[in-house]
Image (tube, grey):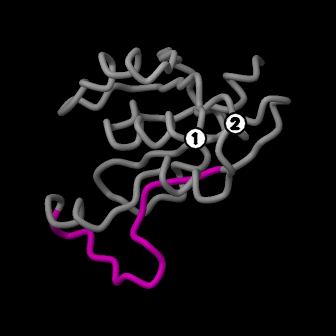
Amino acid sequence: MSWEEYAMALAGVAALKSKDPYVKVGCCLLRHDNTIASLGYNGFPSGVEEDWSDRDERRKYVNHSEQNALRFVKPNECYLAAVTLLPCNDCLKSLASYGIKKVIYREVYDKDDSSLTLANKFGIELEQLDYPLKLS
């Protein structure tokens, strides 16, 4: 198992914690020595009443997995983000501002793939890694 496969497997485990019935997303950030810096999953901010009944309305409130993972690291602490879904433009900008140089992802969001073209401008290497989580 490579470090990237390891990080993606952990991102998959983090995604399992999400209560979002539409899209469960997980993120794992690795430091330069490949230790785990942080995990995150998509969900409502702490203290906000959760209502998942309206998919469009819930988008106004949900923090993305990358945002939740970045809360626990310092700029330039990590080199890699493993995310189960291609980061959106805002999350890609946040990852870039934290010095993340490589993002691996499992799936492309079918409603917006523009991050595929923006990553180069931010100096981020993108790689799709189809590594399924196997708990056996």
> Residue 49: percent from the left, percent from the top?
34, 84
Residue 98, numbered circle: 1
What amino acid type is highlighted by mark number 2? Answer: Cys
Residue found 32% across the figure and 22% down from its top: 118
What label does residue 111 carry, if any? none
Mark 2 and mark 1 lie on one chain; the one further toward the N terminus is 2
Q: Nearer the viewer, residue 38 or 93?
A: 93
- Which one is nearer the viewer's eye here, 81 or 108? 81
Secondary structure state at the residue bearing disc 2 = strand
Asked if residue 46 lies in the magenta stretch, the reply is yes
For this view, does 16 lie left or right of residue 45? right
Residue at point 41%, 49% (across, down): 24
* Mark whose residue sits in front, 2 or 1: 1
Give the residues drawn in magenta, as a range: 39-54
Determine the residue positioned at 81% across, 30% down: 34
Q: Is residue 112 left or right of residue 70?
A: left
The quadrant where residue 62 appears: bottom left
49 w.r.t. 3: above or below: below
Q: Residue 67 or 10: which is nearer the viewer? A: 67
Q: How far from the left and from the top, in percent, is residue 134?
A: 64, 32
Quarter location, residue 81 = top right
Q: Residue at x 68, y 52 (%)?
A: 73
Q: Residues within 10 Å of mark 2 (few under 14, many from 20)?
A: many
Callout 1: SS: loop
Examine the structure image and report whether residue 114 is included in the region drawn in magenta. no
Of 87 and 97, nearer the camera is 97
Q: Residues within 10 Å of mark 1 (few under 14, many from 20)?
A: some
Q: Which mark is residue 78?
A: 2
Q: How far from the left and from the top, in percent, is residue 103?
A: 53, 25
> Dividing the image into 4 quarters, which one contains the N terminus?
top right
| Image marks 2 and 1: residues in contact by CB distance under 8 Å | yes
Amino acid tagged 1: Tyr
